[in-house]
Image (cartoon, rainbow, N blue to C red):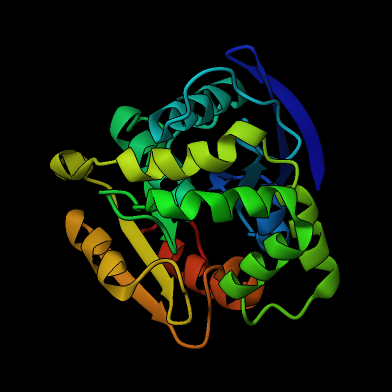
Amino acid sequence: MASDFATVIGVSMFSVMAGSGVPVVYIHGNTGSSLWFKLVMDLPGCRVVALDMPNFGQSSPLDGDISIQRYAAYVAGFMDVRGLREAVVVGHSLGGCVVQSLALERPDLVKAMVLVDSGAPDGLLTPKDRHPVIELMRTNRTVLEQALKATVPTLKDDALFKMIVDDAQKMAAPAWIGNAEALSHFDITSRCAEYKGPVLVIRGTLDPIITNEMAEATAKAYKHARLVTLEGVGHSVTVENPSLFLQIFQNFLAEQGICKK
């Protein structure tokens, strides 16, 4: 894999890329980075790009307000800079909301959506009484490790998990509460019918964050969507069972005539 930085709307954004062919763009979730897709970059016939959104990983922090729509604007700017049009865009968790916003604002960039344990079209409410816990995660690595481990209960790769925690600690300080607030205020339910492309919704049954009802609501919001439920998987199949994700993803691409298996 190669890596690089691009300047987008005055912000330095880091990405890793592999392969050539149909563009596939991976968008990580809260406290995440491109690292969450390290094990699923090998897709024959695809130009795969995983990026760090502003405020995350090796990308620069943002000044001013934080919103899902603003993150989507930076992803769109990155895709424009890199010439990534009509891409299959995969969003995990918060990144799933970013992808949904992107698809509505820039349908020219999004040929299909894959939403992995994604927030629903009406976001994800974090009660304000949880904010002290979020701040404790920001300042206490042990608490952060415990919280992240609970989201990926079947991840056994200790080295990868350590790197995931390392990257989580790089998240810009204002984003810890800012991301929770952004998800709480996100709501595109009135616009979902505008998106006409295929949508694959994936949820692990052990996910403690995204409920089955949320995943079903996401799938019902889009005309050409279907839900795949994975037994024995937590909040992120891309790190817990990457081979299973690749199998499901390649089947989806083949079904849509986007890329052969």
Where residue 85 appears, x then y in whole percent?
Answer: 47, 32
Picture quarter containing residue 115? bottom left
Q: How many marks?
A: 0
**13 left or right, relative to 150:** right
On the question of residue 255 being in view, the answer is: no
Residue 63 position by quadrant: top right
Question: For the point 31% across and 40% down, which residue is it?
Answer: 186
Residue 230 location, x and y as percent?
Answer: 45, 81
> In this view, which residue lies farthest toward the bottom?
232
Residue 201: percent from left, percent from top: 36, 64
Q: Nearer the viewer, residue 131 or 90?
A: 131
Depth order, front residue of 44/216: 216
Residue located 45% across and 32% down the image: 72
Q: Where 234 sits versus 223, above or below? A: below
Where does the image place residue 142, in percent across and percent down from the top left? 76, 64
Residue in the picture at 57% in, 13% down: 9
Vertical arrangement, residue 160 with respect to residue 183, above or below: below
Q: Is residue 138 visible to us here?
A: yes
Name the residue rendered at 62%, 30% in the picture. Answer: 54
Residue extending farthest to the top is 10
Place residue 181 in its image quadrant.
top left
Q: Is residue 157 left or right of residue 179?
A: right
* Image height of 43 relative to 230, above or below: above
Judge left or right: residue 193 versus residue 68.
Answer: left
